[in-house]
Image: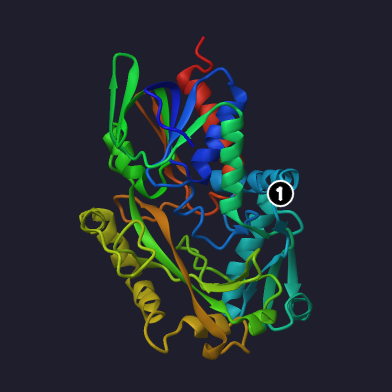
Amino acid sequence: MSGPRGECDLAVVGAGILGLATARELASRHPRLSLQVLEREGAIALHQTSHNSGVVHQGVYYQPGSLKAALCVAGARELYEYCDARAIPVERCGKLIVATEPGQVPRLDELERRGTANGVPGLARVDRHRIAEIEPHVRALDGLHSPETGIVDYGRVAAAYADDVETAGGTITTGCGVTGVRAASGWLRLTHTSGETRARHALFCAGGWSDRLATMAGGGANPRIVPFRGAYMRLRPERRSLVRGMVYPVPDPELPFLGVHLTRRIDGEVLIGPSALLAGARDAYSLRRVRPADVVSTLTWPGTYRMAQRFWRTGIDEARHLLPGGTFVAAAAELVPELRQRDVLPGFAGVRAQAVDRAGRLVDDFVFSHTDRALHVRNAPSPGATSSLAIARYIADEAQRAFDLPYR
């Protein structure tokens, strides 16, 4: 890590896994360009990159033809290859998506259709007998098995990307939050906490703060980031044998969230969760963290109220998870009936940077936009980490077209 340059060809704002993957891709393609990454926090990958379950998704859920579908399937394959090459531990422990009642079977049919259309490797329909072979403690009527779904520590992946950036000649500066963006005289002037950097062009991969930087650069307000806090619990060590890999319910097709599920992590922990509640801050890893500016941003967005009108019942259900003796463990016990409240311990929380449009729709696909001399990642929640190498290639292709790289 080093101090910010006063001038560069390309600036990447945000050193989460997507910003670092994008910087890595561009530094590799165009080694003569001066490139630097500016990160607001004191270290890389402190937000969504390091506050997640670590799942390497395979593309089961996403609408065929969407960016999520294409980039997830390609990105998962490339991520496995990258981890193997860099000796980063990764495990293909597999995922079961199960229907526990007859009314869920048609939704499972739709997931099978999507996964097959997306080319998910090894995806197979499994009956209750096969489910019991794969996950002996799970009880369900029907299921989908994705044997290539895996787990990894995305913090380690991001650190490897950062090493690649610096090896290729790029620089990464932490503690350098961008507070102003202005295009003038053929440059993009980035005001930050260490002064100012003039860049010919910039790529903004700012996660939970992506909308603010986009509007700062002259972009529209739509969509806005509305933060959702997702809390996890974890199984006691002696009860981790209840799950071999991952077990998910059939999700609500109207929501981008996947419901309370059980997920083994690369460190051996087994998580239960997450919840999905509106957060009081874009970094609300603690319930006590409330930032007035973030609350105002959420509550003054028309889409927030329209979303609440559509999903108020879901909000009540999610709130019940947090009550003493609430429904969090009970939801997981629908998948694994042996699970009891005494089997769980407190876990951690993450914050999903979810784009919500003015009409109140939770934006489900990746969203990218342009402003003067800049490209913006406006929405890249899960499977953003899985897809990071593929997204980086997509952004680099866009940058070459928009910026006429490598500056002829």
Q: Which residue is mark 1?
A: 80
Is 163 on the left-hand or right-hand side of 179? right
Residue depicted at 59% across the width and 82% down the height: 236
Q: Residue furthest front?
A: 2
What's the residue at 46%, 22% (across, down)?
402
Image position of 159 with respect to 173: above or below: below
Q: Nearer the viewer, residue 121 or 3?
A: 3
Figure check: 18 above or below 218:
below
371 w.r.t. 73: above or below: above
What residue is at 74 percent from the left and 82 percent from the top?
136
The quarter of the picture where residue 218 lies is top left
Q: From the viewer's side, name the closer residue of 192 and 30.
A: 192
* Label 1 packing within 10 angstroms: few (<14), some (14-19), many (20+): many
Q: Residue at x 61, y 56 (%)?
A: 153
Q: Residue 233 placed where, x, y %?
A: 51, 76
Residue 13 location, quadrant: top left
Q: Identify which amino acid the numbered label 1 is placed on.
A: Tyr
Q: Is 192 placed above or below 17 here?
A: above
Query: On the picture, is 107 further left or further right than 119?
Result: left
- Residue 26, percent across and down? 56, 28
